[in-house]
Amino acid sequence: MYEEAKNLFDAAESSYSEAKSLLEREKYPECVDKFHDTLEFAIKSLLILYNISYKKDHDVGGYLPLIIEKLKPDDPNFELYSKIVLPPFVAIHSALAKIRNFSRYGYKGIPAKNIFNDGIAKAISIMIESNYPILKIWIIDLLYKPQK
């Protein structure tokens, strides 16, 4: 369990770095795809750490409420995680899951590079960069805190 969660977190971190690099190189569709992967892998890592089964799918945003249910009210971070950290990811991941295929394949003959411009990619980057660091800290805390 731990190893799988760590591998997914490492994949999230790798995707995050790659997304930022792709944004700098103006590879906007690829950047959007990698930002989606970042959240998908991070959320899957959390699901494993909270022992929540999930369908092997790219859209795991629907499982976020199950994580909130697993949080213990006496956890000092309960309010932070359940009311501040997780809720934005419901919207962010849902949006990215819906547009992910457009970033890979385009839409009805329109190439992905014509759909995703710097404004869209930068807006997604801002959403991720505003929220991912605290999610990352949470995962690191779960991965490396001593088990009881």
Image (cartoon, rainbow, N blue to C red):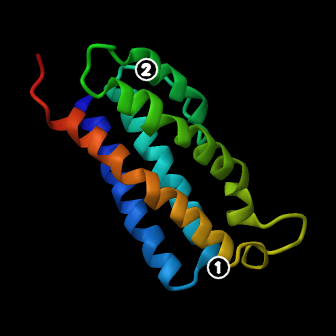
Task: Assess disc 2: are there few (<14), some (14-19) or many (≥20) residues with their C-alpha within 10 Å of its C-alpha.
Answer: few
Depth check, mark 1 against mark 2: the one in front is: 1
Q: Secondary structure at mark 2?
A: loop
Horizontal relation, residue 102 to residue 77: left or right: right
Residue at (43% x, 20% y) in the render: 52
Q: Residue 129 at what x, y percent from top left?
A: 44, 61
Of pointers 1 and 2, the one earlier in the residue sequence: 2
Q: At label 2, which amino acid type do we have?
A: Ile
Q: Is residue 56 above or below residue 105?
A: above
**Residue located 48% across and 48% down the image:** 39
Which one is in front, 43 or 132? Answer: 132
- What type is the residue that disc 1 sits on? Asp
Where is residue 69, by image quadrant? Answer: top left
Label 1, label 2: how far apart the Cα atoms are = 36 Å
**Nearer to me, 105 or 49:** 49
Side (left or right) of 132 relative to 1: right
Snapshot quadrant of residue 106: bottom right
The residue identified by callout 1 is: 118
Which residue matches tag 2? 52
Q: Residue furthest right?
A: 108
Residue 26 lies, with reference to residue 78, above or below; the image says below
Say which residue appears at 13% left-offset and 32% top-offset.
145
The label on residue 146 is none
Q: Classify mark 1: helix, strand or loop.
A: helix
Residue 132 higher or lower than 18, as above or below: above
* Residue 143: percent from left, percent from top: 21, 36
102 displayed left or right of 84: right
The residue that appears at 50% across and 20% down in the rendered structure is 66
